[in-house]
Image: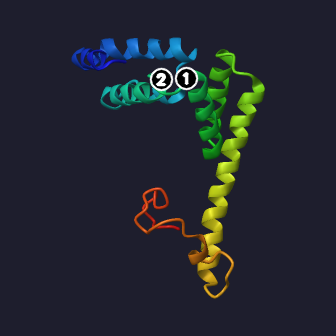
Amino acid sequence: MELEDIVEVLKNDPEKVIPELLEDVRKQYGEVPYIMNFMKDLPEIFIPKTIYDNSIMREFKNLDPETVELISIGVASALRCEHCLKMHIRIAKRKGIPKEKIFSAIMIGASLSNAAVLAESTRALASEFPGDEKGSEENERCCDSDCEVCNISGANIK
């Protein structure tokens, strides 16, 4: 959706815009996600969220649609969102993405989810046993304490 299209959407009456946006989503995905159906009666939330999602998920400037769908599957898998996962698998299937690629995306998501659990858990364990050299904070520093990548959650975890 180009900026001009967004401006037009925002100018129109929500009663007219919401059905059009829902139909556009249905054409793209083959279905309307539950969340969108739930929010359709809340135009102040539905319209900006739909525009935002469209900008991220469907305006493929750097990623092709298959890659976006596989990323969505991997993330839904990692977040353990069964409803999102099933919906994105259905969309991938409609797009002709092979089962093997879908499974690979699930496995990548599972691996990252596992790594996140271990990263948090081993740090918690190490913090309770400070004299133990295993998991020593000094041994695993990758950069300075202001690193936005290492400190993505704002918890200053290294």
Decide which of 24, 40 is in the foreground and name it.
24
Give the quarter of the image for residue 75.
Answer: top right
In the picture, measured across the screen, residue 31 lies left or right of residue 89, that is: left
Q: Residue furthest left?
A: 11
> Which quadrant of the rendered structure holds the N terminus?
top left
What residue is at 69 percent from the left and 78 percent from the top? 134
Q: Residue furthest front?
A: 143
| Residue 5, above or below 82 | above
Q: Name the residue tied to disc 2.
A: 60
| Residue 145, above or below 58 | below
What residue is at 73 percent from the left and 41 percent from the top? 107
Q: Name the residue tied to disc 1.
A: 64
Residue 93 spot, x, y in % from top left: 69, 19
Residue 88 spot, x, y in % from top left: 62, 28
What residue is at 45 percent from the left and 65 percent from the top? 155
In the picture, measured across the screen, residue 22 lies left or right of residue 16, that is: right
What residue is at 52 percent from the left and 15 percent from the top? 28
Are the residues flagged by discs 1 and 2 in contact, CB closer than 8 Å? yes
Give the quarter of the image for residue 8.
Answer: top left
Residue 31 appears in the figure: yes
Q: Secondary structure at mark 1?
A: loop
Tell me the colour scheme of the image: rainbow
Q: Secondary structure at mark 2?
A: loop
Q: Give amino acid for label 1.
A: Asp
Q: Residue furthest right?
A: 100
| Residue 61, above or below 17 | below
In the picture, measured across the screen, residue 96 lies left or right of residue 151, that is: right
Decide which of 76, 103 is in the foreground and name it.
103
